[in-house]
Amino acid sequence: MPTEILMPALSPTMEEGTLAKWLVKEGDTVASGDLLAEIETDKATMEFEAVDEGVIGKILIAEGTEAVKVNTAIAVLLEDGESADDIGATPAQPAGASEPPAEAAAAPASGANAPSPAPAAPAAADGSRIFASPLARRIAADKGLDLSQIKGTGPRGRIVKADVSGVTAAPAPAAVVAAPAPAAASAAAAAPAATGPSTETVLKMYADRDFEEVKLDGMRKTIAARLTEAKQTIPHFYLRREIQLDALLKFRGQLNKQLEGRGVKLSVNDFIIKAVANALQAVPACNAVWAGDRVLQLKPSDVAVAVAIEGGLFTPVLQDADMKSLSALSTEMKDLAARARDRKLAPHEYQGGTFAISNLGMFGIDNFDAIVNPPHAGILAVGTGVKKPVVGADGELTVATVMSVTMSVDHRVIDGALGAQLLEAIVENLENPMVMLA
């Protein structure tokens, strides 16, 4: 039987995506690992690979279609000996549909008198996809096997015919009557609470004014949902300091002169990343994330840095930043920022980290308060460096370049005194930059 190719979940938070471009056409033969399509998620455009071999019998979702739900059938794959005439039994799920077709939902359990349609790619209990060949899935369906309990021996752990041929299904446990799950309540709890007036109310309010509606893309929807959730659920508190940058600027100029031959030019932001990474090692209790009912304290300093792109932002993560040189951090940050603006980052490059940096100094912003991005424990908001009169160590009035920073902290993870220690360590690193090289 033909096999449905489903819209993949390309990141843990992906619920829907845009089928940006098909890289194959109907009638093309594909093998495992061949590129099928380009999928736009809320964060990036990613290439989608074939898991099974076969022939593209029918494309169900046209390229350019937006808001295609994860696990929606987007194409049909034919095996050897099958033709387009065999596709009739494979229902096409409409773009954006959140439920399977009624025919699929009502399909009888496999048995002696029941037909065995080729099942869609199964998923494990944690929602991750289980990779299995079409034949292995069909045999498993006929035998009533749970593929999540079978270890695959094929390429990249794929379940093949040999893995299921000699296996018999375990007897089903006695039925237990359980109270129905409060699905509606769970869904309501998972979604952020409504904020402000409804769409209809706002449209009526401005009905007599000239305006243009701007459609929200996946990134903007995700930013709105996550930051609303963050402000509603994270107990923020804020710590503020001013940092004198003259020693850092002088040291940076000396290093950049020596690095000219290598094509490396260090920015102030590179020093801030290194300062934060080293500070997290000096105050390890702050190098942590909130994990629902516990705190995870990490050993490496994985620092996220906000990068503005058209229509939103990314927070690519520099892993093991405490172990890397300033020049290595500079090169990696430039690469991540460039690919972020092109939406070419892979999920593992912008997920994770324990602490973030948001620098608006290049826009002339003196200071601001940033929102903690869960599950991070904090974020450092960095303003611009400006010339200010200051009282020197000898008590005389002088002029210094001063940068204002605000650290937003999740009080569930970091208490006030502990946060003050972390910010003090960051200031110490930036005001004495040679310490970071020790």
Image (tube, rainbow, N blue to C red):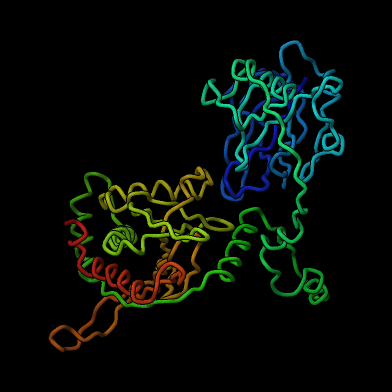
Q: Quadrant of the C terminus?
A: bottom left
Left or right: where does residue 352 sit relative to residue 319? right
Judged from this view, the residue extending furthest toward the left is 394
Residue plotted at (34% across, 63% down): 285
Q: Is residue 101 depicted above or below 269 in this figure? A: above
Along the horizontal axis of the image, is 164 left or right of 391? right
Horizontal and vertical percent position of residue 379: 43, 66
Q: Residue 128, how many percent across, how many down? A: 60, 39
How many marks do you count on the picture? 0
Q: Which is nearer the eye, 52 or 110?
A: 110
| Left-right relation of 327 to 381 | left
The percent position of residue 247, horizontal first and vertical second, equals 20, 69
Query: Measuring 80% from the left and 74% from the top, which residue is drawn there?
Result: 201
| Relative to 103, 258 lies left or right | left
Which residue lies at the image location 18% right of the left edge and 62% below the top edge? Answer: 435
As drawn, 173 above or below 338: above
Q: Quadrant of residue 414?
A: bottom left
Q: Quadrant of the N terminus?
A: top right
* Viewer-proximal residue among 249 and 281: 281
- Front-lying residue, 124 or 391: 124
List the single residue furthest toward the front.
174
In the image shown, does 315 or 283 lie closer to the viewer? 283
Q: Position of residue 121 (x, y in %)?
A: 68, 31
